[in-house]
Amino acid sequence: MCLAIPARVVALLSPDIARIDLSGVQKEISLALVDDVAVGDYVIVHVGYALTRLDPLEAERTLATFAEAGLLPAPEAAR
């Protein structure tokens, strides 16, 4: 089973590396598989790679569902 999660890009460190934030946890990931990512975009992340950009509304819905399931802190608690 694989799990890919939405995360917000908070910094572009190089053309192929970004720093993402997920509920206050930040991590560097590869952007080698996705073009035209900007700070503020949401990306689907799996094992350190962004797989695709995601609509912000869809990302927020998914993160809220994860929070409701107890898998993440509530979105307002994470900010």
Image: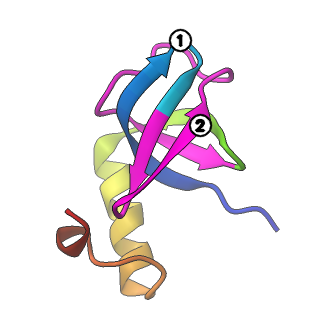
Q: Quadrant of the N terminus?
A: bottom right
Residue, x 59% and y 18% (percent of image)?
16
> Where does label 1 land, which residue?
15
Q: Which residues are magenta?
A: 19-46
Q: Position of residue 75 (x, y in %)?
A: 25, 69
Check disc 2 and give the amino acid type: Ile
> Where does label 2 land, which residue?
29
Q: Position of residue 38 (x, y in %)?
A: 36, 21
Q: Position of residue 60 (x, y in %)?
A: 31, 57
In this view, the residue in front, 53 or 10, is 10
Check disc 1 and give the amino acid type: Pro
Residue at mark 2 to residue at mark 1: CA–CA distance: 11 Å
Residue 16 appears left or right of 58: right
68 up-or-down from 32: above or below: below
Q: Position of residue 41 (x, y in %)?
A: 35, 33
Q: Quadrant of the C terminus?
A: bottom left
